[in-house]
Image (cartoon, rainbow, N blue to C red):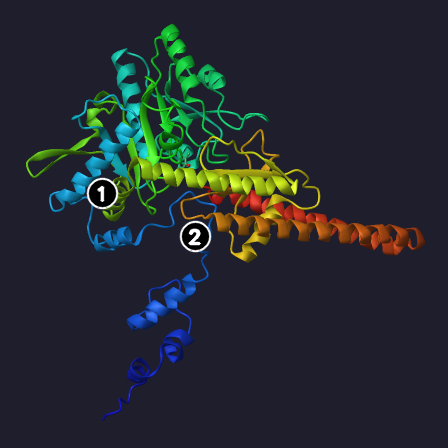
Amino acid sequence: MVISSTTDDYDQNLHCTFASRYVRTSLPRFKMPDKPIPKDAAYQIINDELMLDGNPRLNLASFVTTWMEPECDKLIMSSLNKNYVDMDEYPVTTELQNRCVNMIARLFHAPIGEDDTAVGVGTVGSSEAIMLAGLAFKRKWQEKRKSQGKTYHNPNIVTGSNVQVCWEKFARYFEVDLKVVNLTEDCYVMDPVKAVEMVDENTICVAAILGSTMTGEFEDVKLLNELLTKKNKETGWNTPIHVDAASGGFVAPFLYPDLEWDFRLPLVRSINVSGHKYGLVYAGVGWVVWRTKEDLPDDLVFHINYLGSDQPTFTLNFSKGSSQIIAQYYQFIRLGFEGYKDVMKNCNENVMVLKEGLEKTGRFNIISKDIGVPLLAFSLKDSSSYTVFHISESLRRFGWVIPAYTMPPDVQHVSVLRVVIREDFSHSLADRLIADIVRVVNEMEAARSTDNTRNANISTIKTRNTHEGEASEHSKREMQLGISKFWRRFVHGKKSSSVC
Ligand SMILES: *Cc1c(COP(=O)(O)O)cnc(C)c1O
């Protein structure tokens, strides 16, 4: 046997991964390394670094799916190398997308015949879907203004200030003014009366949210439709409604089938929904559907001729994976209406378990409503000595990722913790979470009473020795300063780390 003389071969062939030089030196982070490394070492190094990410299943900050059935995982893995945009080459995948659009449009009561093809498209998520819906409204409005010989350079959208950040993005990227209805102390969603008051001749649409990101609450689309219909009659503006049903679009039809929020309301012209939220698919799929063909201006649509038939496309990006579309179709046929209903019911039950558990502690105000997206938003009744931000931070040590954040302007003195309940969150996990929250809160209470005792002692000392007393006052101020720094970091951090 010839033993190789180079260190490289020696490392690669004989050493175990953890003794090899690849893991003994740190990898460059800014410049691509000059030389390759063995695949097992690359795998190990990256895998190990990723261990420091949180556990997605315990990430209760997000609506986005973290568990699917192994059979679906298999379908996803086997389609990883399929580019969705190659419709000619993968006609079946395109067909599955069209079936999903048809199913969603009908779930949302689009006024189409039994055999009619619905108008809609799969996207990377609701954000892309909202850009497309917004563009369609903007173009429709511009066409109308042009035909009337009026100016068409200052369009606006009316929303609540609780909108998800993607609406602000749409407004900025596509130069539309965002007119926001501010929230109030007793209403954490858009007030339809105020929204309709804000509508003017340049309003391209009013966007209502089915499932406010902050509290999960459904906005009153029916009342909005009613008030706007009246205003449209008076003004002749014909302002339409878009429903951002990113989180609630796959909840309401199953849990609250009688709630009218969708195409049953005549002014609702388009709806977006995130397939990767309660559509129960991993991150990377959203949908937008239009009421009729007329609601999607034809000059925004590109027509691709595939296999001799016309496939209209309307997206912002070109290439993307096929897996999520295939996975969405899997969920639709695997679960059916009844299956989705069961999943949503179970989520709701777990919200109730958590709600009751937290109410029992007597320390929290529940902010979220019983009807809405399955989540629990709650604030502290007394945050004089510790805050929801402290609780959020402390829960991290058990592995829980539960965001704390301040509400939008006007109610920003209210800060809440938000727990999103997804399909894979069980009753037992809910029990564990309650126990851990109680434990964290008890610890903080205990720390508070120790502090109080110490402060009481300090004031006794102070009467005896003024200097010592002043020093303690100083350290108390330092501590308060520390807390407010801690606050600012979180409040500030809230802007960049999205709560979606
Ligand atoms: C999550 C969310 C979005 C953004 O959706 P993505 O699918 O993550 O792009 C938009 N609006 C609301 C109300 C949301 O909850």
Residue at image point 52% right, 39% down: 352
Q: Amino acid at mark 1?
A: Phe
In the rendered view, would you say 377 is above or below 186?
below
Q: Nearer the viewer, residue 292 or 360?
A: 360
Q: Residue furthest left?
A: 308
Q: Are marks 2 and 1 in contact (CB under 8 Å)?
A: no
* Secondary structure type for disc 1: loop
Q: Residue 165 appears in which quarter of the rendering?
A: top left
Q: Decide if residue 102 is on the left or right side of residue 183.
A: left
Image disc number at residue 318: 1
Mark drawn on residue 57: 2
Could you say where residue 171 lies in the image, as x and y percent from the top left?
Answer: 39, 30
Amino acid on which disc 2 is placed: Arg
Q: Quadrant of the C terminus?
A: top left
Q: Image quarter for residue 472?
A: bottom right
Foreground pick, 35 / 302: 302
**In this rendering, would 467 be left or right of 228?**
right
Q: Position of residue 154 (x, y in %)?
A: 37, 21
Residue 138 locus on image (x, y percent): 31, 24
Image quarter for ligand 1 equals: top left
